[in-house]
Image (cartoon, rainbow, N blue to C red):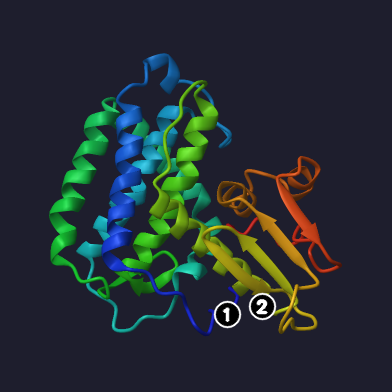
């Protein structure tokens, strides 16, 4: 795992919780409208159907509940950006669980509603700095909720891509948190100051080894929109395709991020 950033970004606990509930609410409202035929549609996630994708979205929040049920670790040893590098190791187990949950919960609306109710009952009593043991290590509750915004935003986009005509909205704060976490993950993976990656209006990070930029216009600049960045960082969009389609601009000899993406394992 790459080393953690020296000065991790801070996130507001209340706004982060609101963002998680807002995005989960958007997904739940959309799922309630889906027909059996739409739930059976394929997705871009291997052999997952929409039903299995929705079941997996539920686990993004049940993971928080399971972590709250365990004793708090003695100390924090990871940051939200490090979570991105731990996801690949659990891919087989995640897929198996999605298939099982989809089969066990034919009423997906009731399944998601129950998860939200449980989390709303548990979270108010928990401080944002409460430590949780997660698949990436010990981090704060607020930090882990930031990783949940990545899960929710990414899979909202997967859902929209799978169901023609569906347009599940993306909560602005959830999109901002997800964008920032994945931008920070890039800076962790490729530390340095030669390249500036801009994802307006939410994030700017310096990364990639080489001559450090100090003032004026940086010699190496990458710029793209938040959702495009999230697709690049999670492997939903290839770097070369993004360049060819003018979805990302890159200038300078150290502005090629193709070898660093995707970030999620």
Residue at x-position 81% and y-position 69%: 254
Picture coordinates of residue 70, whole percent (x, y): 23, 67
Residue at x-position 26% and y-position 37%: 112
Q: In which quarter of the image is residue 33?
A: top left
Q: Which of marks 1 and 2 is nearer the N terminus?
A: 1
In terms of depth relative to the viewer, which is nearer, 163 or 198?
A: 198
Picture coordinates of residue 101, whole percent (x, y): 34, 36
Q: In the rendered picture of this protein, how many numbered marks are placed on residues?
A: 2
Residue at x-position 72% and y-position 82%: 215
Mark 2 burial class by Cα count in 10 Å: few <14, some 14-19, many 20+: some
Task: Classify residue 234 as left or right of residue 261.
Answer: left
Task: Classify residue 225 as left or right of residue 257.
Answer: left
Mark 1 burial class by Cα count in 10 Å: few <14, some 14-19, many 20+: few
In terms of depth relative to the viewer, which is nearer, 65 or 141?
A: 141
Front of the two marks 1 and 2: 2
Badge 1 vs badge 2, beta-carbon distance below 8 Å: yes
Q: Is mark 2 on a helix, strand or loop?
A: loop
Viewer can see residue 184: yes
Task: Classify residue 169 as left or right of residue 47.
Answer: left
Instruction: Give residue 3's mark.
Output: 1
Picture coordinates of residue 81, whole percent (x, y): 50, 68
Instruction: Give residue 191's mark.
Output: 2
In terms of depth relative to the viewer, which is nearer, 210 or 134?
A: 210
Viewer can see residue 48: no
Q: Quadrant of the N terminus?
A: bottom right
Q: Quadrant of the C terminus?
A: bottom right
């Amino acid at each position: 795992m790459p080393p953690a950033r020296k000065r991790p970004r801070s996130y507001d606990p209340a706004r982060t919780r609101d963002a998680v509930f807002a995005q989960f609410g958007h997904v739940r409202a959309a799922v309630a409208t889906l027909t059996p035929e739409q739930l059976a549609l394929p997705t871009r996630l291997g052999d997952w159907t929409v039903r299995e994708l929705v079941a997996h979205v539920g686990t993004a929040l049940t993971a928080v509940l399971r972590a709250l049920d365990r004793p708090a670790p003695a100390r924090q040893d990871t940051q939200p950006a490090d979570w991105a590098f731990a996801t690949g190791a659990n891919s087989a187990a995640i897929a198996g669980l999605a298939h099982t949950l989809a089969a066990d919960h034919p009423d997906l609306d009731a399944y998601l509603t129950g998860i939200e109710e449980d989390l709303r009952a548990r979270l108010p009593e928990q401080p944002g700095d409460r430590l949780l043991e997660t698949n990436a290590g010990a981090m704060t509750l607020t930090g882990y909720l930031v990783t949940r915004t990545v899960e929710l935003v990414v899979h909202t986009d997967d859902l929209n891509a799978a169901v023609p005509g569906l347009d599940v909205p993306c909560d602005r704060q959830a999109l901002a948190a997800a964008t920032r976490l994945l931008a920070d993950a890039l800076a962790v993976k490729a530390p340095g100051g030669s390249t500036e990656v801009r994802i307006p209006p939410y994030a700017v990070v310096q990364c990639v080894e080489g001559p450090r930029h100090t003032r004026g216009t940086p010699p190496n600049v990458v710029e793209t929109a938040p959702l495009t960045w999230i697709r690049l960082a999670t492997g939903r969009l290839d770097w070369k395709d993004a360049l060819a389609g003018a979805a990302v601009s890159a200038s300078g000899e150290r502005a090629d991020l193709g070898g660093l993406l995707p970030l999620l394992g």
